[in-house]
Image: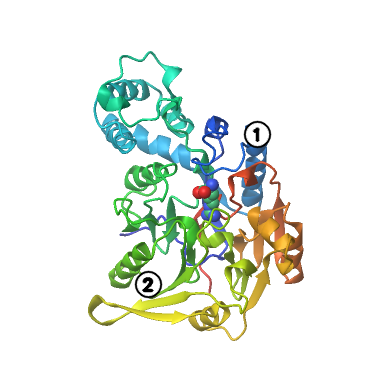
Amino acid sequence: MTDKAIQVNSEIGKLETVLLKRPGAEVENITPDTMERLLFDDIPFLEIAQKEHDYFANVLRENGAEVLYVDDLATDALSISGDIRNQFIETFLDEEGYGLGSTHDALKEYLMGMDVKDMVAKLYAGVRRTEFPFKNDSLHDLAGRDAANPFLLDPLPNAYFTRDPQASMGSGMTINHMTFKARQPESLFTEYIMKYHPRFADKVDIWRNRNFNTRIEGGDELILNDHVLAIGVSQRTSSKSIEGLARELFNNPNSQFDTVVAIEIPHNHAMMHLDTVFTMVNRDQFTVFPGIMDEEGKMNIFVLTPGDQGAINLQHYNNLEKVIKDVLHLSELDLIFTGNSDAIVAPREQWNDGSNTLTIAPGEVVTYNRNYVSNQMLREHGILVHEVISSELSRGRGGPRCMSQPLWRENLN
Ligand SMILES: NC(=[NH2+])NCCC[C@H](N)C(=O)O
């Protein structure tokens, strides 16, 4: 591989290029009945969510980052040829359970008849039964389906959390098999972008593809430095995927990663990913939600390193501070607790992604303005905080880190 298209050797190096998805019609295709299945706690007001998202994108641009939009890249990649488009639609429909039959044929005809940009927007927004003249359902299409669901293809309202379908890691990426059906199609877009978009094709190491059936999501994948990762063992990422990824990274000559810190966190909706409770904001500073530790401050942490003949060594620890200091060779570590560890403020601000900071340079972060206690804590610890507006975006349970996929960060010296 001559030139690289991805360079992410830390969580904190100056952000140069970032991938976002502006919330679209998909967000208005959530209903009270589907909300839970679609992983939302409320229905955002799209117009305001878009304004907030544009504000976020502008803060990143003003601070020197190139902002790319995933739907634009997908449109470019799928515009390359009818064959690529055909293959994509066949896979998409097949994964949605329309491998053959009259619904498959009708959906395919409808989607392939669109302008590519509209087709991409439609796949994110979802396709309703009543949208196009629909011939007879076949038994195959109806059996086992929820007849009350007005959507033939469900909307993908979580797409604006671009962190999760994949994770940039060194010169490559993991393209993720996501946990819930509601999000699984999202990483198919990443796969096609990485495979066909001229900016990325043949320039990205794929450490793990989405065809594995064990789950992993980008919110759990933290790049602590050019050879150490922290990965959450969580509702969304299994120990099996972590082991598989570690094995690949330790044995692939293009990878420099030799240490994976697997951090077990509670399996629940408020803390679905490691980055909702633990993020890196500077070389020796991290945010932490106190609720991930027991009363004695302990938790389950496993450090994976290469063993003999492709095996993996595993060590168990329970003190997060000590492990991070060891793997990063630091003498001191500053842990900044969400909501100042207050019994009410900490869980409230964690719920609104108070720990989900996006670091745009060492000691410089983007956070939601609603988490004012955590933001104040960050400032008191010397961090430069850029606040973004957050009333509607936060209803999907994700913050600035979740809403961004760095593709290029300046290397630290
Ligand atoms: N990296 C993150 N913390 N992402 C948050 C994703 C939130 C989204 N509603 C989900 O449940 O999947």
Type of the residue with mark 2: Gln
Figure check: 350 above or below 185: below
Residue under the image location 73 percent in, 71 percent down: 382
Can residue 330 be seen here? The reply is yes
Q: Could you classify mark 1 by the number of other residues whose Cα lies within 10 Å: few (under 14), some (14-19), or many (20 or more)? A: some
For the question of whether residue 161 can be seen, the reply is no
Decide if residue 361 is on the left or right side of residue 230: right
Q: Residue at x 63, y 44 (%)?
A: 395
Q: Splitting the image into 4 quarters, where does residue 91 fall?
A: top left
Whichever of labels 1 and 2 marks the residue nearer the N terminus, that label is 1
Q: Secondary structure at mark 1?
A: loop
Q: Which disc is residue 11 wearing?
A: none
**Gap in angstroms between the C-alphas marked 1 and 2:** 44 Å
Q: In the figure, is residue 330 to the left or right of 195?
A: right
Residue located at (38% from left, 53% from top): 176
> Of 122 and 157, which appears nearest the observer?
157
In the picture, the disc for residue 45 is 1
Q: Percent position (x, y) of residue 110?
A: 36, 21
x, y percentage for residue 274? Answer: 52, 62
Q: Position of residue 350 (x, y in %)?
A: 65, 58
Disc 2 target residue: 256
Question: Camera-side residue: 28 or 221?
Answer: 28
Vertical comparison of 317 with 270: above or below: below
Q: Is residue 79 above or below residue 379?
A: above
